[in-house]
Amino acid sequence: MSLFGRFRAGENAFDYFMRRLIMRALCKSVGDDLQVAPNVVLKHPETMEFGNSVFIGAQAMIQGRFDGTCRIGNHVWIGPMAYFDARNLVLEDYVGWGPGAKVLGSEHTGDPVDVPIIATALTIKPVVIGQGADIGTNSTILPGVRIGANAIIGAGAVVNHDVPEYAIAAGVPARVLRSRLNTNGHNQVEIGEKQ
């Protein structure tokens, strides 16, 4: 990783090229047109798969685990300062991940109660972000959650349960505010209608 560190902070075309080249060597698989902004941190890149046309923003951290999996689909945009606890994580194609948004794939059990929480066992739960979903700035996705395809998660939300396809969810804890579909399964605003 020292070679990656050498080119980690640069912003010129050569640094971008070298980061992409090094990630191809370190990761399980890397598609075409990967863009890695400065100061991205990867832990256990050998468990990571990146599709085509993936962008990873500056200072993002993807923390894999030696026995985990992390699969990032095609045309995924990951904002600056994002954090992924990528123990068992899937981001499907066309996911937008807002700046500072976080996903956690594990949590401490807290048992027994006479032991410090950070010393208790970890429970690892998979997280899946469906195709076309948009995760808002500074939101947090907790372990075991599935975000449905084309759902929108509002900025700053804390998502502790599954969110259905096409839902708009926000708040702490997040709750579904409405669907992006009307009762006929079509877009809320039909073509030709005034908003």
Image: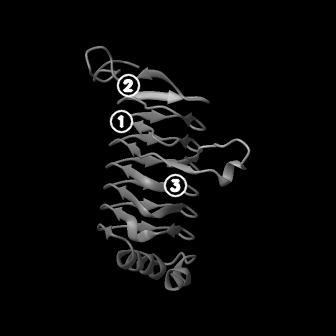
Camera-side mark, 3 or 1: 3
Horizontally, residue 53 falls left or right of residue 154, namely: left
Q: Identify the residue at the far top of this view.
A: 183
Q: Dot 3 surroundings within 10 Å: few (below 14), some, or many (20 or more)?
A: many
Tell me, yes or no, if residue 104 can be seen here: no
Residue 138 position in % (x across, y down): 60, 44
Regarding mark 1 in the picture, which secondary structure is present there? Answer: loop
Q: Within the image, what quadrant is residue 155 found in? A: top right
For image coordinates 38% across by 25% down, the residue present is: 180
Horizontally, residue 152 falls left or right of residue 181, namely: right
Read off the residue under disc 1: 150
Which of the numbered marks, if any, corresponds to residue 85?
3
Separation of marks 2 and 1 at Cα, in angstroms: 9 Å
Regarding mark 3 in the picture, which secondary structure is present there? Answer: strand
Amino acid type shown at disc 3: Asp
Please state which of residues 59 and 110 is positioned toward the viewer in this rendering.
110
